[in-house]
Amino acid sequence: MKLFLINILILLFLLSCRNSDEKNPADDPAIKEASVAIVKELKGFYFVGMNSRIPSIYYYDFVNDKIKLIKSGKDEKIYELEVAPDGNAFFYLTYTALNKKIAIPEINGIKIFRYEPAVDKSELLQSLKPAIQLYSYWMDNDRFRVVAISFDEIVASYLNKNALTFNYFGKLLSDENELFDIVKSGYPVVETPALANVSPLKRFEVIAKNDSLLIRNNYDGTEKKLNLLKNNLLKIAWADNLQQVVLFMKNPEADKTDASHNIILYDLLKKKIVKTFEEKGIKSFLLLGDYLIYDYKLSQNYSINIFQLSSMKNIKTLSLRDGCALKSLPIK
């Protein structure tokens, strides 16, 4: 009996001497923050769709479950749409025609617009000369960038890279030009936005060790290894609910003629992947409020899926006769 009591006392002593730096997972402030997180109410979103075979801008109304045509015209066909991270405005690029009479087709009649939904008004920001490559992206929540690659008018082996950066409201911040000798320096590398690898309240981080991706909890320093390669990671988005993060991954096994990606939904509190989206032809996604919205190739045309985070269910699929997508459709 005496020996038993001594063992109990030793055990209690060891427990009391536990490392003072060890933290109780139940006390993680991320749990409380997620319970009171404010999730933005989404009334609808903008996307690109075909209207009489003309790439146009549409709006899906959540409340009335209706699709509305916003912008459409033969002289200003939609090339690319980029909705602001907050979903409250967007920039879009238009073109008049694709010149296929040359070895490398040129996009003609390029214009850059900003649209303000609150007043239903488009503002022309810039016109560009013909380009053989054109793309745009949000650098962060406040800056939008357009990159156009075109042939040099004097030297045949030279390419011009024109990169324009605008603030959220459409003011031109910079207009940069670079000259590339494709024989010596090769084709200009496609720009990509910086990864938002830290959560809004800095509780979590997406980090890389060796070739693998991990989710780090900054409260207790624990790390969860994912079966994902860091070189395939293209984009990170953190949900309003402060509980989930979306990882947009390149799918190296996809058919090269049909660029495709995977979308990984990771639960920060459950510490595990709760959903993987692997539909054919996934091109892009939006994370707005309680919804993860992404486009994919259904049969011959592109469609849009709307997935609700709170219910973990797909609640709607948008389809138009000649296809629809979040950012762009193939130009012909």
Image: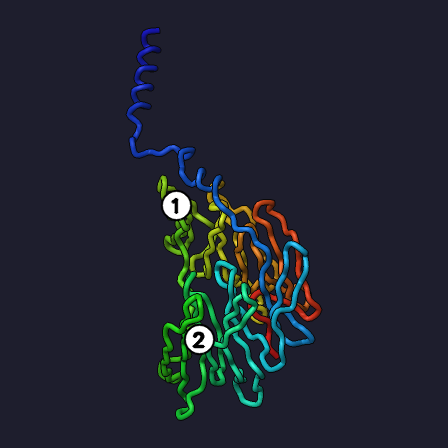
- Say which of 252 and 239 sits in front: 239
Q: Which residue is mark 2?
A: 147
Give the residue type at disc 2: Val
In the rendered image of this protein, does residue 24 appear above or below residue 153?
Answer: above
Q: Quadrant of residue 29?
A: top left
Most extreme residue toward the top, as rendered? 1
Q: Which mark is residue 287?
A: none
> Could you say where residue 252 lies in the image, as x and y percent from the top left?
51, 63
Question: Which residue sits furthest front?
Answer: 119
**At 68% across and 71% down in the image, what residue appears?**
322
Q: Residues within 10 Å of mark 2 (few under 14, many from 20)?
A: some
Q: Secondary structure at mark 2?
A: strand
Q: Relative to 187, say whether 31 is above or below.
A: above
Picture coordinates of residue 53 (x, y %)?
67, 76
**Quadrant location, the C terminus:** bottom right
Q: Where residue 72 appears, x then y in whole percent? A: 62, 75
Q: Which mark is residue 203?
A: 1
